[in-house]
Structures are given as structure tokens and as C-alpha cells.
């Protein structure tokens, strides 16, 4: 089975950036891309009401059916708009996929077909300045790399890999080295915790592994303890186009993607975030 780049889109202002990131990744890796739009299925939410009052339930079901038809029409327009956005690159012929259900559950059902998932950092119903409510749930549920993009996507010229020596981040380094996604892109490997013999040895291994994968590397050991802000500051001060993290790691970095710090990093980082599992 050929795994696809799956771009999860809605009718928010994030759609063009998600499409741009998917097109870039599809060409870099050399696999097809699929534009996915998920309609929340309302039927289950009405079943209890229908059981209480048959006449009221029938009316609600008729209204839901009409609303669902309208949502499907809107979804088709979103997919068409996204396809047209991708049409600027004549080499791309993205597939379209319309599903109904809960976003996290739909994505989990497609995991075997997924090489890389791309999401916007917020959706159509997310209040301004907030993080999309599904992002952390998706990260926890899936075991595929997830690229979370900002309002605009810039092809990476310099990336930053947050490393803490954990099994997850060690595996992440190997994944980056083995994939064509980031071949030739300059990479700053950043470890928060200061200069120790162990850290220097770990960073030397990272350098050797990434350079073996045709990725130019610089390594940096940061003495600061506030890991989330240190990483965001480094990205801002060094013109980083993409941050890369493992979904789980040691101590501070572990909490970046399982607790409230996730929102801080995603909202304050100036670039895309690639989460590796």
C-alpha cells in the first residue's frame, strides 16, 4: 500500500497553508497527497431526543438531514477550492476525500494509509489567538508524523530539532536522517540543559547521524531551564522555518506535547512544528 500525505482541511483561513505544506511534502517524499475534509456527524446527537418523542424526533431528523446535505455541499466546495489552490503546480493531482464522523476517529481509521498528516494550528470554529482543540488529541491518538502549520507555510531553509536524549527523540533523529523530506536543509539541533560530557556525546551522535542523511548540522546546548520558551526564543532569533520534536521525551520536553505547554509552543512559535512518533 502506498501511503499518502494527508492534508486535513476545513473552510478556515488555514486551508491554503495546509495545502502548500502538503504539496511541498508530496514532492519532497515522492508520494501522493490526499485532501481530507471531515463533516461532524450529527445523527448520534439526536438519537436520544428521537427516542423521547417520536414526532419531535422525526422533525429533528428531517432538519438534520437537510443540514447534513448543506454541509456536504459546502464540503465539496472546500475540497474544490483546495484542489484549485494546488493546481498552480501542474505536477500535482491531489485526491479528494470526504468523511463524516469525529475528526480524531476518522484520522485514526486512516492511519495505515498515512505517511504524514498535515494540520493547521486552528480550525474554522477556533477563537482567534487560540489553538485548535483537536490538535493534542490527534497527537496522542496517532503514531504517524504530524506537521502543524501556521497561517502561512514557507518551504524550510533552516530547521530546528529539539533533542533531549530520550528514546523518542533518538528515534526522531533517525527518522529525519532516513527520510528525503529534509535532505539538504540546514538543521540546528538544540538541547536545553547546558554543557555536560553526556550532552556533548549525545550531540556528536546526532551530528554524525544527520550528516549521514545529507543534512547539514549545527549543534547548540542551551543552559536555560524554561524549555518551552527557550525553544521558541531560539526559533524566533534564528529565522527557523520548522521546529521538530518527538511527541514524548524526558522531563520538560515530554510535557511540551502532553500538557498545557503545547499551546504555548504552537501559538508562540514563528514556524511550523513537525511532531514525530
Image (tube, helix red, strand yellow):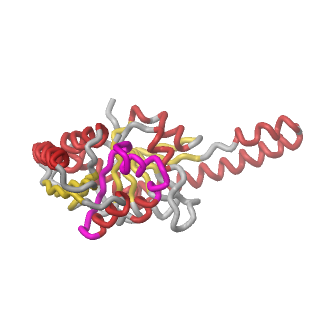
Q: Please tell me whether residue 153 is drawn above or below residue 115 in the rendered image.
A: below
Asked whether, in this view, residue 40 is left or right of residue 153, the answer is: right
Quadrant that contains the C terminus: top left
Q: Residue 233 lies in what quarter of the image?
A: bottom left
- Hey, which quadrant is residue 115 in on the image? top left
Residues rendered magenta in the picture: 237-263
Residue at 41% over, 65% down:
268
Instruction: Give the residue at the far front of this rendering.
Output: 196
Q: Residue 155's image quarter?
A: bottom left
Q: Is residue 63 shown in magenta?
A: no
Residue at the outermost top position: 1
Q: Residue furthest bottom?
A: 237
What is the x, y in percent for residue 130? 52, 63
Q: Position of residue 44 (x, y in %)?
A: 70, 38
Closer to the camera in the image, 214 or 246: 246
Q: Which quadrant would the N terminus be assigned to in this image?
A: top left
Residue drawn at (45%, 49%), measured in percent from left and top? 8
User: Is 251 positioned to the left or the right of 75 in the image?
Assistant: left
Which residue occupies the foreground of this view, 275 or 198? 198
Residue that appears at 54% across and 44% down: 103
164 left or right of 259?
left
State the image coordinates of residue 132 (x, y, percent, origin top left): 52, 56
State the residue at coordinates (28%, 47%): 164
**Nearest to the observer: residue 159 or residue 47:** 159
Q: How many marks?
A: 0
The stretch drawn in magenta includes residue 243 = yes
Q: Is residue 21 at all visible to an observer of this figure? A: yes
Amino acid at each position: 500500500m502506498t501511503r499518502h500525505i494527508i492534508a486535513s482541511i476545513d473552510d478556515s483561513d488555514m486551508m491554503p497553508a495546509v495545502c502548500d505544506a502538503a504539496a511541498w511534502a508530496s514532492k519532497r517524499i515522492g508520494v501522493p497527497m490526499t485532501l481530507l475534509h471531515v463533516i461532524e456527524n450529527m445523527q448520534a446527537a439526536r438519537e436520544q431526543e428521537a427516542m423521547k418523542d417520536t414526532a419531535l424526533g422525526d422533525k429533528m431528523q428531517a432538519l438534520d438531514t437537510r443540514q447534513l446535505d448543506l454541509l456536504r455541499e459546502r464540503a465539496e466546495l472546500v475540497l474544490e477550492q483546495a484542489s484549485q489552490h494546488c493546481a498552480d503546480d501542474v505536477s500535482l493531482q491531489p485526491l479528494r476525500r470526504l468523511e463524516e464522523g469525529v475528526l480524531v476517529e476518522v484520522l485514526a481509521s486512516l492511519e495505515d494509509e498515512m505517511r504524514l498528516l498535515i494540520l493547521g494550528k486552528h480550525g474554522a470554529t477556533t477563537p482567534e489567538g487560540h489553538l485548535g482543540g483537536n490538535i493534542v488529541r490527534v497527537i496522542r491518538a496517532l503514531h504517524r508524523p504530524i506537521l502543524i502549520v501556521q497561517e502561512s507555510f514557507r518551504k524550510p531553509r533552516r530547521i530546528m530539532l529539539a533533542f533531549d536524549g530520550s528514546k523518542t527523540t533518538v528515534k526522531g533523529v533517525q527518522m529525519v536522517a532516513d527520510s528525503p523530506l529534509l535532505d539538504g536543509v540546514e538543521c540546528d539541533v538544540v538541547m536545553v540543559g547546558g554543557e555536560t560530557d553526556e550532552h556533548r556525546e549525545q550531540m556528536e551522535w546526532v551530528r554524525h547521524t544527520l550528516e549521514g542523511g545529507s543534512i547539514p548540522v549545527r549543534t547548540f546546548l542551551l543552559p536555560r531551564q524554561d524549555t518551552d520558551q527557550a525553544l521558541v526564543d531560539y526559533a524566533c532569533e534564528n529565522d527557523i522555518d520548522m521546529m521538530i520534536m518527538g511527541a514524548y521525551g524526558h522531563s520538560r520536553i515530554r510535557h511540551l506535547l502532553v500538557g498545557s505547554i503545547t499551546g504555548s509552543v504552537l501559538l508562540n512559535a514563528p514556524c511550523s512544528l513537525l511532531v514525530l512518533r
